[in-house]
Amino acid sequence: MELVDIGANLGHESFDPDRAEVLARARDAGVAQIVVTGASETESAIALGVARTAPGTLFSTAGVHPHHAREWGATSAAALERLAAEPEVVAIGETGLDFNRDFSPRADQERAFEAHLELAARLGMPVFLHERDAHERFLAIVSRWRAQLSHAVVHCFTGDRAALDAYLDLGLHVGVTGWICDERRGLHLREIIARVPLDRLMIETDAPYLLPRDLVPKPKTRRNEPMHLRHILRAVAAVVGVEPEMLARSTTETARRFFGLPNPA
């Protein structure tokens, strides 16, 4: 069984002491490839450096998360474009809107978001999207750009049925994390994720965040790792109503097609 984790923050400092061991555990769990998320100009450069340590296995994205949108400046687009020219970089993002925490002013978030979409459209690259508590504005902006974008995935989807249907109507892909394993806030996902066509469904850990709450035994640390993608796969397979092996094949094929990933040697 081969899996692709489409979103893991392996450049995070929590992985600095044991990143090689984390990757080894992921391989042992069947995770064949990982897309390392870039969340700021600096973190995108770090993500690229991490990706270069394992050619053919690790890849990265280049973007500025809406939490960091206040940092978007006159040279930001050019900086991301330089990163995007590297073969390991397979998508623009993480980008989008987060009105849940508003770490950056909403006007700054929208300005940076539009700039990312313009860059992705011009370069013909997929977009790695973030949306939380901002559905209406997010949908309006993506709708304006959708015809110019090749592919786009709403990563770590946590919204409701109406939001999901709107994104599916736009032809977007959907990424599911361990949020679906959370009995406090993820139960609604178990009722709607089966609506996503299998050729547009992908899975991710968002490590080191979103450790699945129903892991048994629970890890001594709260840090999530790509090796737990297999647990997420089983949870998603159960609610979609297919065997884990079938969902593994489907999500892996979809991820490789979406990001243009090679088959591992």
Image (tube, rainbow, N blue to C red):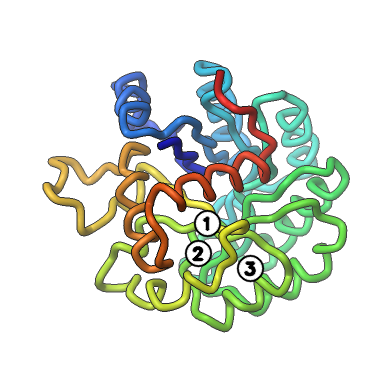
The tag earlier along the polypeptide, 2 or 3, is 3
Check if mark 2's residue and mark 1's residue have beta carbons within 8 Å.
Answer: yes
Q: Under tag 3, what secondary structure?
A: helix
Q: Residue 157 got which mark? A: 2
Q: Residues within 10 Å of mark 3 (few under 14, many from 20)?
A: some
Q: Under tag 1, what secondary structure?
A: strand
Instruction: Name the amino acid, label 1.
Output: Gly
User: Marks 1 and 3, Cα distance to the nearest angstrom?
Assistant: 24 Å
Give the residue pinned by disc 3. Answer: 106
Query: Where residue 257 sits in the image (x, y, percent)?
Result: 67, 42
57 and 120: which is toward the camera: 57
Q: Is 180 above or below relative to 177?
A: below
Q: Residues within 10 Å of mark 1 (few under 14, many from 20)?
A: many
Check if mark 1's residue and mark 3's residue have beta carbons within 8 Å.
Answer: no
Check if mark 2's residue and mark 3's residue have beta carbons within 8 Å.
Answer: no
Give the residue displayed 41% in from the left and 56% down from the top: 177
Q: Is residue 149 left or right of residue 233?
A: right
Give the residue pinned by disc 1. Answer: 175
Quarter of the C terminus within the rendering: top right
Give the residue displayed 53% in from the left and 53% down from the top: 202
Instruction: Name the amino acid, label 2.
Output: Phe
Instruction: Name the amino acid, label 3.
Output: Arg
Q: Under tag 2, what secondary structure?
A: loop
Q: Residues within 10 Å of mark 2 (few under 14, many from 20)?
A: many
93 and 192: which is toward the camera: 192
160 and 168: which is toward the camera: 168
User: Marks 2 and 3, Cα distance to the nearest angstrom?
Assistant: 20 Å
Q: Is residue 41 left or right of residue 220?
A: right
The tag earlier along the polypeptide, 2 or 1, is 2
